[in-house]
Structures are given as structure tokens and as C-alpha cells.
Amino acid sequence: CSAYVPACLDQHCNPSAGVNLYVIDSLAEKRMGLGKSWKMEEPIPKGGTLLQEGIATLLQVEVGDPIILGVKLPEYLHSASPQMASSNAFFLLLSSVAGIIKDGESGGKLSEEETQGALVEAGPFFAS
């Protein structure tokens, strides 16, 4: 498994699914008025992830269940360094399901077309 982490996850963490990871700053977004109809009053708890309902169903997880997010770094580093963007850098984020976003109730945090969203809070995410 150490040769290629995504293959390891697919092999040993079943079910698995690709998600679109959104790293948000709830407090800053609230001050700016983004996602005005967002129902959560507090930031996403440290170590927690919000999943859209369809992904939670596919993964067979509920609030409180542990999950592993495999993050491909090149997707986040392209603007910082083209050399890093071409690497196979990958890291794992151990998390738990902090909440499930029902279809059509993302409160402006996600586009209406998004069906595979996972949200984490920026502060704890970058501090990990």
C-alpha cells in the first residue's frame, strides 16, 4: 500500500468515493455575507467534515462515523508552484462526519449542481 496511497484506499477502505473538498472559513464568510441561508451557526468542529447527503449515503456513513479523506496536493498547489503541481503528493486527513447536508440545503456554500461536496473548516484543516 505504501507505493500509491489512492490505490490502497480503494483496496482497503470500501466503500470509497471521490468527493470535491471545500475548505471554508465559516466566520469570515459570515462576516462577508456569503451563504446567508447557511443553517449552521457555529464553524464546522475541528476534525469534522460535512458531507452532502448523496455521498454520505454512498459511503454508508452517519454523523459521528470516522472517515478518511485522501487529498491530492497538486490540485491545491498548482498556483503556488508548477513543479509541485506535477507531483503525486498526497496526504490523508482523518476525520469524522460532523453533519450531513441535505440535497438542496447547502445554504449557498455549494453550487446547486454540486452533488459530491465535502466541507472542512480552514483553520483546523491547515493546522493539521
Image (cartoon, rainbow, N blue to C red):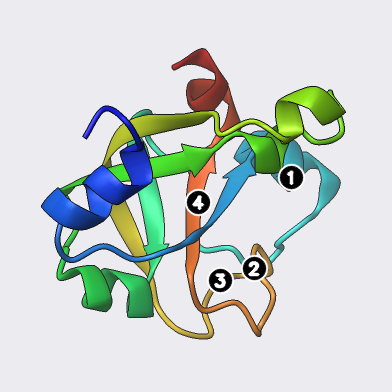
Q: Helix, strand or loop at disc 1?
A: helix
Q: In whole angstroms, how far apart are the C-alphas of marks 2 and 4?
A: 9 Å
Of circles 3 and 2, which is in front? 2
Residue located beneath label 1 in the image: 29
Residue located beneath label 2 in the image: 110
Residue located beneath label 3 in the image: 106
Q: Dot 2, how many residues are within 10 Å of its Cα: few (below 14), some (14-19), or many (20+)?
A: some
Residue located beneath label 4 in the image: 119
Tell me the residue at 24%/44% (across/down). Answer: 8
Is 50 situated left or right of 83 in this image? left
Let me know if residue 102 appears in the view. Answer: yes
Q: Helix, strand or loop at disc 2?
A: loop
Residue furthest to the top = 127
How far across and how far down the image is residue 122, in percent?
A: 59, 31
Q: In whole angstroms, how far apart are the C-alphas of marks 1 and 2?
A: 13 Å
- Up/down of 112 relative to 100, above or below: below
How far across and how far down the image is residue 124, in percent?
A: 48, 23
Residue 80's tag is none
Of circles 1 and 2, which is in front? 2
Tell me the residue at 65%/84% (across/down). Answer: 113
How far across and how far down the image is residue 16, in percent?
A: 26, 62
